[in-house]
Each structure stands twice: as structure tokens, then as C-alpha cells.
Amino acid sequence: MKLKVCWMYHDIMDLYGDKGNILTLQKRCLDRGIDFDLETCGIGQEKDLSDFDLVFLGGGADKEQLSLIPDLLKRKDNILQALEENTFFLLICGGYQLFGQYYISANNDMIEGLKINSYHTETGKEKSRCIGNVIIAARLDDLHTKIIGFENHIGKNISANEDIFNEGSFYGTYIIGPILVRNPKLCSLFIHKLIDSKEKDFEYGEEDYEFEKKHMKKQLKMHSDGIPKFS
């Protein structure tokens, strides 16, 4: 079993250690007997995204996002083709908002997105910046769990579920940084979704992420105030 992965704009969209998501996926896959074939795709580089099992795009500041938008818009038809052919997309923060209708920059400019999903991102009315660790309650398929993340932005993503957005093979979150590093259950779910889309009867190697689970338990204890209830 092999996963073919494309990391888009790896050289400019890695604001808060988003590469940690790729490294974690790679390590966890290799540990379970899954080959991990990673390619990168920069501005102007030709890639057929439908050839990949997973496309990953991390976060970046307004300057970085504005630099890549013309290139990203040119890829819209290929992105739609990839989604139709069940390529998985994992998008973090800035990468996530670029797939929506539009976003409002820190200078109050409206930046056109790919318009693939219905959500959009607005600048906070008071332009107050949200900074710090967050804990959210997430429901993804049969997984009901707490997700640890980090915020440092003045924008607010407007969607049906502004914490974790999932439609088919599309996964996105406005939470920044290496979310799969800090949330081992979420990482396991994502790997199983990817593999099940290719081979439902695949026999996984044993999984061992005790260190990550201990770290998550410690983080939950440190930031236990204000955790929302599952709805």
C-alpha cells in the first residue's frame, strides 16, 4: 500500500509549523506498513492533482496568500477534477480559507477565493487578535473527541462548522499549526479514511502513539477551562 501525497506551496505556506502535519502523517503511515510518496508543488509548477491520494496546504500570512492566489485560481478545474476523483484535501488556516468564497484581509481588502465551498472569512469587527491554545469539541463520523489547536488571527471563518469542516474527501480547519501532531485520534481517523478509500480490507500494522496521547492528556489538563460540551 502506498499513499501519493502533494504538499502545495510548501515553501511559503508553513506559517506555524504546518510541516509537522506532513511529518506526522509520514511517520505514522510508515510505522503501519504504508509507503508515503511525498511531492511538493510550488507556484508555476505543473502537477496533475488528481494523480494524488492527498493534497495538503498549510497556512500563511496575507502577503504569502496574495502571492499564490493567481496560481491557485488557474488550478481550479484540476482541483475540482481531483475532488470528483476522491483525492483527499487537508487544508489548514490560510489554505483552508482560500478554498472558500472570499476572505477579508487585515487591510479590509476582499480577496477572491476558489469558491469551491460556501464558507468565507471576515475580519473581526474590533480587529482584536485571538492568540493562544484552544480546545474544541469535534464530531467526525463516529469520532467524538476534543481537538487541541492554536489561534493567532483576527479573522473569523463563517461556515456550518467553523472548527472542523468536512465534506466528502475535503477536510479543513481554521485552527493553525500541526493539528495532527497534537491530536493522535484525529490523525488515525484521517489515515483510515485515506486507506479505506483505496482498499477497505487493508491490514494495518500495529499503532503505537502513547507519547502523543500522554502529551494530549497533559495539554487537556492544562487548558481544561471552557471546554464546550458535545452537541
Image (cartoon, rainbow, N blue to C red):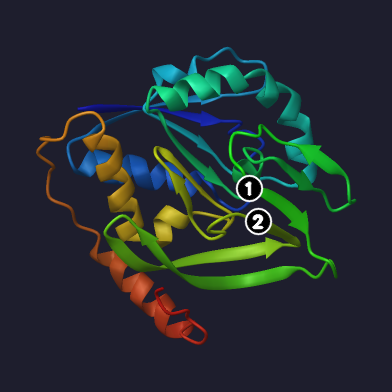
Q: Position of residue 134 (x, y in %)?
A: 54, 72
Q: Which residue in the protein does label 2 denote?
A: 158
Does the CB distance between marks 1 and 2 fall below 8 Å? yes
Q: Position of residue 70 (x, y in %)?
A: 75, 24
Q: Which residue in the protein does label 1 denote?
A: 119
In which quadrant of the rendered image does the C terminus lie? bottom left
Quadrant for residue 111, please give it.
top right
Tell me the tag on residue 30: none
Please give left or right for residue 143 compared with residue 163 in the image: left
Q: Is residue 65 above or below residue 69?
A: below
Within-10-Å neighbours for mark 2: few <14, some 14–19, many 20+: some
Judge whether residue 143 can be spotted in this image.
Answer: yes
Nearer to me, 149 or 199: 199
Secondary structure under the numbered disc 1 in the rendered image? loop
Nearer to me, 186 or 168: 168
Q: Is residue 180 above or below residue 223?
A: above
